Amino acid sequence: MQNKDKSQNSPQKNTKGIDVFTPIVTKTMNPGFVYLNETPFFFPAKSIIKELISEFTDVDNNFVEQFQTTGFDSRIWELYLHCYLKEEYFILERDHNAPDFVINKNKQRIALEACTIGRNAIKHPNKKILELSPEEMLEANRNLIPIRFGSTLYSKLNKEKPYWELLHTKGIPLIFAIADFHDEYSMCVSSTGLAIYLYGYAYTDSFVNGQQIIIPEKIKEHRFENKVIPSGFFFQPKSEHVSAVLTSSCGTISKFNRMGRQCGYKKNNYKILHTGTKYNPRPNASMADFFSYEVNETSRETWADGLSLYHNPNALYPISETLFPNIVHHYLENTYIRSVIPPSNIMSSMTLNLGPES
């Protein structure tokens, strides 16, 4: 996790009574925290975080300070992972500062380190990510987005004291859980670039006699401006210690807002509209299905929706997908990516807050 001073020693844990919303700083308060704390639109998110935080362990004793300042995005991601792992019935062992989680289910222990792409990451020089043309987006997926992910993942892989050498994580699988916060809607569109970087292949498709043909292309490197990195993270030295990479298309504060509204938290006449794309199960489908609905107590979104696990074909300790049954799993087989996708899986989405201020 960014902005943390971690060690192998057991922390002095703060396990209950964390108050994340009473300001402890003034001049450096994060705009995202201010918006969450003071805007009526985010009353459901604020309410459910207050409820969930009672079960959260602050292993670094700086969660509140970072949540309110420079680490807001990173801490939202960490709290989101906590919620998902609890939903999936993992036992969370938070007895050490690093990695962020050691999880246990069915007698299988897994180390999980959370990391983020921050707001200061390398950006397109002229446009936000949703302003890119299809051609520009294609180019970004082949170069710019992989470089963003590569900067964070490579630094995690090459820590001075690697996670796989810690006494409490030796001999167990390791997952890097990464979220892209560099732009307002970056999670919606960055998964393609991540897959290209992890496996070192890009794909084009065409139709022959009504059948979709997928054509793989081996990618050697990624270039943007003066930056060049090798492609294929899972084929880099030491990467065999990383069993998989976990990411989400919607692990943001809006997720908490929707989940809070589902649980019955609402304020006056404010409404939440959830819209986006989901998995299209039809044969030869080249486009996702569209969905749109008003979020309320009858909605059935889960914390797992939008999560994907990219399995390392060279992992020393492979992970069984049965431990993570409700998310997307990706595997590289020969030169193709095989994906195991739950029905109605959310591929990307946006949340619209509707009310007097809209």
Image (spheres, helix red, strand yellow):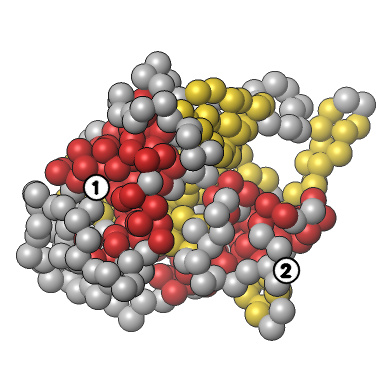
Q: Which residue is mark 2?
A: 126
Residue type, label 1: Ile
Pick whichever of labels 2 and 1 is earlier in the sequence: 1
Note whether residue 143 is visible. no
Specify the quadrant of the image occupied by residue 6: bottom left
**In the visual, does 304 lie left or right of 75?**
right
Q: Which mark is residue 103?
A: 1
Most distant residue in the right direction:
209
State the residue at coordinates (57%, 51%): 185
Residue type, label 2: Asn
**In the visual, does 221 lie left or right of 261?**
right
Residue 101 place in picture, x, y as percent: 25, 54
Residue 203 place in picture, x, y as percent: 75, 49
Residue 160 place in picture, x, y as percent: 33, 81
* 10 Å crowding of disc 1: few (<14), some (14-19), many (20+): some
Q: Quadrant of the N terminus?
A: bottom left
Q: Which mark is residue 21?
A: none
Choose mark 2 or mark 1, whichever is in front. Answer: 2
Note whether residue 21 is visible. yes
- Nearest the eye: 43 or 285: 43
Specify the quadrant of the image occupied by residue 269: top left
**In the visual, does 62 lie left or right of 83?**
left
- Nearest the eye: 249 or 253: 253
- Nearest the eye: 258 or 96: 258
Q: Is residue 105 above or below residue 228?
A: above
Question: Element type at marker 2?
Answer: loop
State the residue at coordinates (34%, 46%): 80
State the residue at coordinates (29%, 60%): 67
Q: CA distance from mark 2 to mark 1?
A: 42 Å
Residue 105 place in picture, x, y as percent: 23, 38
Question: Element type at marker 1?
Answer: strand
* 10 Å crowding of disc 2: few (<14), some (14-19), many (20+): few
